[in-house]
Image (cartoon, helix red, strand yellow):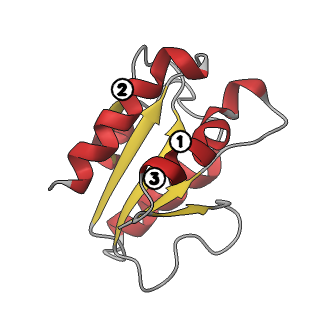
Amino acid sequence: MKIYIFGNPLVKEDSLPLRILPTLKKLFPRIEFIIADPNENFPPKSEKDLIILDTVKGIKEPMILNLDDLADIKSTPISPHDYDLLFHLLLLKKTKKLNHVKIIGVPEKKRGEVFGSINGLIKSLKDR
């Protein structure tokens, strides 16, 4: 299983996925965590089903979202990557170059406040 990690270490509101990454790697050694950049050939052409861990603006607790959930929210930015990653993924889905995208949405909170929930969400995806 691969999980693509997005975030910006220089922007506090967008850095939580990167800050928890070392702990996630220790807890889930069989999962391949890949730091990704939406502007650099993402996703790889061979990937049709994606799992992404990213900050999602406006949510209170970590949750699993799909592109349809995010496509319904059009009026306000929901992630620092809104205008590149989300638009890009929606376009790829529309052109049938992607099948499924699961986004582990992380709120803009402190690490300790959400880590247990994120851990549980990853376990639930891993067990499917």
Upstream in sequence: badge 1 or badge 2: 1
The answer to whether marks 3 and 1 mark residues whose Cβ atoms lie closer than 8 Å is yes
Q: Nearer the viewer, residue 48 or 89?
A: 48
In the image shown, does 30 or 10 lie closer to the viewer?
A: 30
Q: Looking at the image, which residue is at 58% across and 23% down?
A: 111
What crowding class fits label 1: few (fewer than 14 Cα within 10 Å), some (14-19), or many (20 or more)? Answer: many
Please tell me whether mark 3 sits on a helix, a strand or a loop.
strand
Residue denoted by label 2: 117
* Residue type at tag 2: Ser
Q: Which residue is mark 3?
A: 52
Q: Classify 103 as above or below 90.
A: above
Quadrant where the image shows the C terminus: bottom left
Residue 101, position in %: x, y?
A: 33, 57
**Mark on residue 125?**
none
Quick one: label 3, few (<14), some, or many (20+) residues within 10 Å? many
- CA separation, marks 2 and 3? 15 Å
Tell me if 41 is positioned left or right of 101 in this view.
right
Q: Identify residue for label 1.
A: 54
Q: Residue furthest right?
A: 10
Measuring from the top left, give residue 27's x and y in whole percent: 44, 47
Task: Give how far apart the Cα atoms at labels 1 and 2 are.
Answer: 14 Å
Residue at the image position 31 percent from the left and 74 percent from the top: 96
Residue 116, located in which quarter of the rendered image? top left
Residue under the image location 59 percent in, 46 percent down = 21
Indicate the amino acid at tag 3: Ile
Give whichever of 69, 49 is nearer the camera: 49
Quarter-of-image position of residue 92: bottom left
Residue in view at x 76 percent, y 25 percent: 12
Q: Is residue 101 above or below residue 112?
A: below
Where's residue 1, x and y in %?
35, 67
Q: Give how far apart the Cα atoms at labels 3 and 1 are.
A: 6 Å
Residue type at numbered disc 1: Asp
